[in-house]
Image: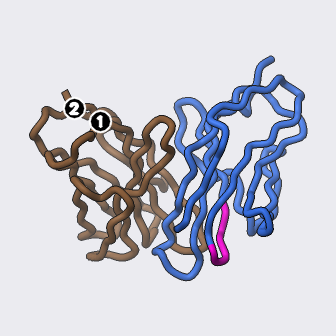
Chain colours: A brown, B blue
Amino acid sequence: DGGITQSPKYLFRKEGQNVTLSCEQNLNHDAMYWYRQDPGQGLRLIYYSQIVNDFQKGDIAEGYSVSREKKESFPLTVTSAQKNPTAFYLCASSFGEGWGYTFGSGTRLTVV
Amino acid sequence: AQRVTQPEKLLSVFKGAPVELKCNYSYSGSPELFWYVQYSRQRLQLLLRHISRESIKGFTADLNKGETSFHLKKPFAQEEDSAMYYCALRALGNQGGKLIFGQGTELSVKP
């Protein structure tokens, strides 16, 4: 069953802690993306990766980090430097330019 | 700079009425435009691509380069169309295939 899986669905973090959100796909997609979804602001791009071992910053990369060691995986770390981390995080993948995205079901992160 | 604007946060219509969700974009080159939809408790999913020129679930969208718009239309709204709709733009030729999304419009279709 092909698709893109995000885990966990809900995540609670204490202030000052780093947390890592998982994103795995078995669609053989080359490109992967992380977006943050906030009410009234749409989806804003955090990081994206076109190929393994390469990634670029999006519009709101500050306070976040990523890695792309495998084609299937693109984990996102929300660091303590992120000022307002409480949000809904969406991962997506694609064959790249000219193709649409397949989205994961999202992770809701709450700082407590 | 590339930008997508959806001027309406909420659009409420009655069942059977026509619906138009507005999308305007700012980009100097040749864009690729998309509409994505998110139904309650479901994943965000692709609805339309402008290059496909297709009709999905009765929705159509035409790219108007002169007005830099890509409005989504349906002649007769159904209750199951109630969802969050996002317009998105991709710059062709570079940018890593990334999409720029608008703020989203919530469509509410009342019985």
Mark 1 vs 2: CB contact within 8 A: yes
Which of the two discs, 1 and 2, labels the residue nearer the N terminus?
1
In the image, residue A3 lies in the stretch drawn in magenta: no
Q: Per the image, is B32 magenta?
A: yes
Work out which residue is located at the far top of the displayed protein and give it: B111
Q: For the residue marked with disc 1, what is the amino acid?
A: Thr
Q: Secondary structure at mark 1?
A: loop
Q: Which mark is residue A111?
A: 2
Q: What residue sits 34% from the left and 62% below the top?
A: A47
In the picture shown, does residue A31 fall above or below A81?
below
Q: CA distance from mark 1 to mark 2?
A: 6 Å
Could you say which quadrant of the image residue A99 lies in?
A: bottom right
| Percent position of residue A48, x then y | 37, 65
Residue under label 1, please give it. Answer: A86
- Which of the labelled discs sits on residue A12, or is there none? none
Q: Position of residue A16 (x, y in %)?
A: 9, 39
